[in-house]
Image (tube, rainbow, N blue to C red):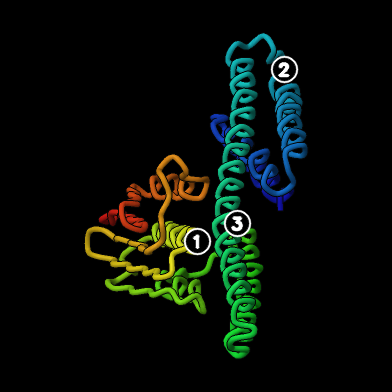
Amino acid sequence: MLVVQAGLVVVVAFADGSGMARVLFLLLPFGAYFAFGRVVAVGVGVGVVVFLVAAFEITVPGWTRSVEHVSDLVMFGIGVVLALAMAEMSAAAERNRVARDVHDGLGHHLTAVSVLLEKASAFREIDPEVADRAVADAREAARRALEDVRTSVRALREPFRLGESLGRLVHGLGVSVTCTGDESRYAPAVLSALYRAGQEGITNAMRHGGSDVTVTVHCGRREARLVVEDDGPGFPPEREGFGLSGVRERIGQVGGSVEVDCAAGTRLTVVVPRVMG
């Protein structure tokens, strides 16, 4: 694919008498970075510069004495460096996104497995049927954890449904979820951010001993609001960990806000405005 792209760029560049189309060569190291990695991308970038020098030697005799051509080559070299830097930044941002997704998803499911196995242990002698059901739910939670990691890593481009995803998330955990409004008004990035916020809130509620956990979501005409409440002991603000920090960062990226109230239990409130368009 990269070879075909390079061929097309060469044809367009030489068909353009003004030389402006040479900027298209910058697409080659940028694309090579994501297809083959940094080393290949740098090699492609160097190769493109060498190719342009050779092309100048053949088509423009004495080009080294032309300020215009020399400056064009220097600017192109700078452009290659910038293209590689942009590719690196894009890859780093994607790695951070996947890392947050894996942390949020895996953390929730492993907490659920722990809670369910503790329940199974507690009820083993009292009510074996309840214990067996808890073990089955723990097995299902472990399966969903693996599925969630695969989904995050592969970054599948499938329609995301917030209500359905939250329902699957709390299956077997005794958590109440209520979703109202029209989520189709909102972009997938917003719905995904709300889902991860809800996931983190539920994980923290179970981790900190909340027995009555409720999740309410309303997707209104102007804003979406998600609230996760529990009756646990809560935690002091200074103990806010990586999970909630990640939620604040993720929600901030879609223009929303996050509030945590631990006065009586814990209440996580996330509000995200709908971008009109």
Establish if 132 lies above or below 66. below
Q: Quadrant of residue 174?
A: bottom left
At x 65%, y 77%, the residue is: 139
- Which of 238 and 35 lies nearest the eye of the viewer? 238
Which residue is outermost to the front?
Answer: 126
Specify the quadrant that holds the C terminus: bottom left
The type of residue carrying mark 3 is Val
At x 54%, y 31%, the residue is: 20
- Which of 256 and 25 lies nearest the eye of the viewer? 256
Which residue is outermost to the bottom?
Answer: 129
Residue beneath label 2, please?
Answer: 61
The type of residue carrying mark 1 is Thr
At x 64%, y 61%, the residue is: 154
Q: Residue 244: x, y in percent? A: 46, 49
At x 40%, y 68%, the residue is: 213
Taking the image as shown, residue 114 lies to the left or right of residue 35, namely left
Q: Earlier in the sequence, mark 3 or mark 1?
A: 3
